[in-house]
Amino acid sequence: MTTNLAPDRRRPSAEASPDDVLVVDDLVRRYGDLTAVDGVSFRIAPGETYGLLGPNGAGKTTIISMVAGLIPADEGTITVLGQPVGPTRIAVKRHIGLVPQELAIYPELSGRENLTFFGRLQGLHSKDLAHRVDEVLDLIGLTDRAKDATKEYSGGMKRRLNIGIGLLHRPTLLILDEPTVGVDPQSRNAILESVEALSVEGMAVLYTTHYMEEAERLCDRIAIIDSGRFQAEGTRAELIRLTGELDQIRLSGSGAITAAADAIRALPAVQQADADRHTLVLTVRDAPTAVAAIVTAASTAGMTLSDVEISRPNLESVFLQLTGKALRD
Amino acid sequence: MRRTDMRQLWTMTASDLRQRVRDKSVIIFALLVPLALMFVFNLTFGGAQDVTLEKIDVAVSMPDGDQLAAALVAAALDSEAVQVNRTAAPADEIRGLVQSGEVAMGIVVPEGFGAAVTAGQEAVVDVVQGDQGELEGAVVVAVLQSVLDRLAAGTVAAIAGGQLGLPHDQLAALAQAAATAGPQFTLTEGEASTEQLSSSATLVAGQAGLFLLFTVGFGVLGLLAEREQGTLARLRSMPMPPGLIVAAKGLVSYILGVVATTVLLVVGGRLFDVSFGSPPAVAVLVLCVVAAGVSLMFIIARVARTAEQATVSQSILAMVLGMSAGAFFPITAGGALGQLMDLNPIAAFMRGLGITNGGGGIGDIGTPVLIMLGFAALTAAASRIVPDRGADL
């Protein structure tokens, strides 16, 4: 079930608007008995980056496949700039740029040849195409290696080219499916900067990830998805409010852990305390202020502490609270 | 088809061909490996199957004026089976000539040979054979033996005539007539015989047909590899009809198949001194067999779940169809199995090449062409029916 956020707490872009680039309404996709996507609806406005955050197998790629027109939806509708999307809807695909999760490039071709090939299929020609290829090569930082076969590229370079191909025809809607999987931190940062720049240019971006940090950094609005359903949707701040803005303190150690848990539960800032053999996990209000009293109570009760860890609420904790499991499960 | 579609089709086809040439796999599997196999098989089997008889020197001693002796020697040495340099020599020198190597063999027809045959008496013809020209000598001996058998029939006729009380002069005439008469049966070279490829031509045609089934996989089965590497999803997100991707792969397969098969037939023909006859007719056969091969690949692409599965299936089918067509050695079968093997497009291709090799033109290759095109149509139709587990065609 989707957690409904009050309309007045949502960004203006979340409201239905005739200017919306992408409108997805009550989308359903089944594979035999499995319902991979179950009643998903969302909209993306121009210049907005919309994130689908969920673990592997949550249904993100299936949604993207339908939005990109690769597979049909069993139920529901998708429109881009008001035009219906589907495998046989050719014209609307000119407005969509897809960056698949796999490195969808040809290893025997050079970076320039890959771009030129997909540019031609997108309908670019002659000087237009050559000029745009140069622009994209510059944008993704591969001008110097443009003539090299991509099989000689590093993983990060291939990822950048993968994104560059999606951008080549200046799509109105760019779909990025886990574009940073398997990328080193430096290349990841470069990719994230590129995506940030795109939304500034007015491109609507649909971004899937199971990395909470990426969703927090890039996305104006985020849908938390699990088992094919949206569990919640909103801005980062809106989603975090769903947790009650409670912090988490983790105490590790030995000794009288159960007694320590009982003592800590009595403290006014503590909402919840769960103990196992070596750890106490506490849900507390204003952890930085409460931590001193908590540590004192634990020690007094006979627990020998080896580590204290404070976590502020984030999308990970939202996901945990909504689904009962971690993002990387 | 719209102009834009044509442009996109050609863009995909040209790019795919460029990649196949660059990764060299198609050059290795479609050209180098089959040519190497042709060479090896030709060395192994070619010599054993295509025997060329050399000219042989034969020394002959026979009595002057003996018509039957002359007929015997003429029949043995003037046959088309083997070419002979005949030398006349005295009987007592024959063995020496053979031992010295001056001649490969010697034949001594004894004095009174003709009279003995017509009288129904025993006559012994000596043959001396040396180390040279063993095979050619064996052929001469075989021919000589067959003539002697016919002369023996004359002797039997003479004895039978004697027992019936015929006069002596009639007995001699009867014996001579029976001994020297031509054969009662004649052997005419039939259609099947003239349409048979030589062993070298069979190897060239067979390897070209067999490896065609590997070559055409580089296009169509590439759909599965593209799906695995993600480029298929990207292609399907492009503004073009989804069927265009499949058409481009089919076109790549077809072009590669036609080029590789043509090169193999031409180069193989040059290397092993084989001619397949009328180029237009051979071209028609190539176009048809490639169509059959490409259609077969579409079934594999539908049924196989992964590129690896497709490669294994392709290899099995190629070997089964290639071997049953006789790509490595002749295979015969009767009954239903034989009829089934006749429907094999590679076998039809080789049979078609046999017809062109025997002098046939486009008008003579209707049956193999129909078999190949029928196979292509059936497999293309089947590829639309079988469950699509692989390339999402």
Image (cartoon, coloured by chain):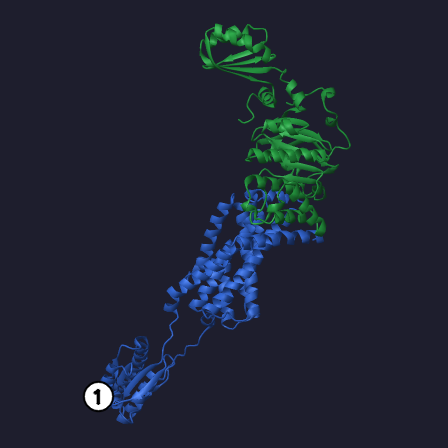
x and y percent of residue B384 in the render?
Answer: 59, 48
Q: Secondary structure at mark 1?
A: helix
Question: Of residues B268 and A163, which is closer to you in this image?
Answer: A163
The percent position of residue B266, horizontal first and vertical second, equals 51, 67
Identify which residue, B377 or A256, lies in the foreground: A256
Q: Which residue is mark 1?
A: B92
Q: Is residue B83 above or below residue A129?
A: below
Tell me the chain of label 1: B
The residue carrying pointer 1 sits among few (fewer than 14), some (14 to 19) or many (20 or more) residues within 10 Å by Cα, namely few
Query: Where, by quadrant of the figure, is residue B79 drawn?
Result: bottom left
The type of residue carrying mark 1 is Asp
Residue A9 visible at all: yes
Chain given the colour blue = B
Q: Measured along the vertical axis of the image, is residue A152 above or below residue A54?
A: below
State the image coordinates of residue B332 (x, y, percent, origin top left).
42, 62
Which residue is situated farthest in the front direction here?
A144
Judge whether A203 appears above or below B115 on screen: above
Residue A231 pos. (x, y %): 63, 24
Colour green belongs to chain: A
